[in-house]
Image (cartoon, rainbow, N blue to C red):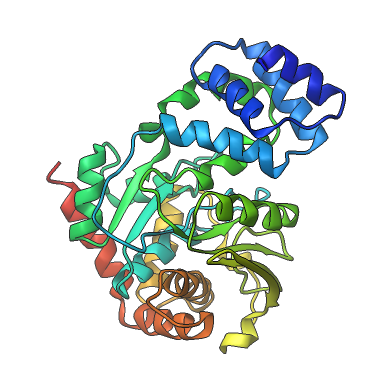
Amino acid sequence: MDIKQGINTVASGRNIKQQEMYNIMSEILEGHATDAQIGAFLIGLSIKGETVEEILGAVTVMRELSAKVDTNVSNLVDTCGTGGLGVGIFNVSTSSAFVACACGAKVAKHGNRSATRKSGSADLLEEAGVSLALKPSQVADCIENVGLGFMFAPAHHSAMRHVAGPRNEIAQKSIFNILGPLTNPASAKCQVMGVYDKKWMIPLANVLKELGSKHVIIVNSKDGLDEISIADTTYITEMKNGDIKEYEIIPEDFGFQRSSIEDLFVDSPQESLDLAKLALAGKHESAGSMISMTAGAALYVSGIATSLKSGIELAKECVGDGGGLKKLNQLVEYTSQF
């Protein structure tokens, strides 16, 4: 099946088989489809609704075309999410990665700039002084020697340049919004993944199961975050060794006082970094609590902690003693040599 046939298929509301989706996505990412064809296909697919088979076909192509990071590290963990619904809080997932790293996890952090350029992973790290222009081998060095390496998505997924124009022009979420967290260039088998819509939680757990992930926690909060929220209920889908379960958590389950996210909003990368540093130094309670919950989940899925609760307790201690901030400073210094 080619993209023309794919457009007709999704326009009629029919699903596409995994191999057929693989062929269409290969055509797109190898530069053989026009912008008009790509836009029509993405919109039609979105209106119909993407299936697990379709996502698997697409993600397989993206993984094959990526610039991979090879390490000798087991139980690598990533905290990459899809992005939320335009809720402009500081970058929790990146801040949490440093705490998880300080507690002994090996983190292969995958990320990009945010659409608003306010609080994406790359925006925050660049503001902090971390070099983004690293070769895959240099990212591997960071993971092995610092405990955390950052993989800037455009540097590892150059084929995405073929869809940049159509994605900007259609100005709506598409399958590519969920492919990013599924295409970690270091092949991390453990993940804490935030999603912008609860509807994706079970499908993506099944996708990651089929792709061979070991232990994954997928989160979406009632207040619209792709994070574990300090302000509201968070929905969890957990996939561990092929088994999938769903449950809900609230901040009080872990000894946190529920608080508004209003003081977590930022308007620039500098504000995002400033708030992250305050939290990592134990000087901002609600931000520190958000970080502790996500970092705790990362410690749990990577095997450092035996439960979500014990992982969060471990992360709390690290936030209190500034261990995550030390790791951020270490990464800044380490990447300066490249």
List the single residue furthest toward the left.
337
In the foreground, 18 or 72: 18
Q: In percent of the image, x 42 and y 80: which residue is there?
A: 305
x, y percent for residue 67: 34, 34
Q: Position of residue 31 (x, y in %)?
A: 51, 14
Q: Is residue 3 above or below residue 52?
A: above
**In terms of image quadrants, where is residue 101?**
bottom left
Q: Is residue 224 above or below residue 63?
A: below
Residue at x 45% of width, y 24% of height: 159
Report x, y in % for residue 325: 30, 68
* Identity of the residue drawn at 59% across and 49% down: 83
Q: In the displayed orientation, state which residue is furthest to the bottom.
A: 255
Quarter of the image where the N terminus is located: top right
**Up/down of 208 relative to 47, above or below:** below
User: Eyeballing the image, is 28 above or below 176?
Assistant: above
User: How far across and down, in percent of the image, does residue 272 sit?
Assistant: 45, 56
Residue furthest toward the right?
12
- Is residue 328 toward the left or the right of residue 192 in the image? left
Q: Which residue does the image show at 49% across and 17% down from the upper left?
A: 30
Whether residue 232 is visible to the viewer of this picture, yes or no, is: no
Count the marks: how many?
0
Viewer can see residue 207: yes
Q: In front here: 50 or 328?
A: 50
Between 296 and 29, the one nearer to me in the picture = 29
In which quadrant will I find the C terminus?
Answer: top left
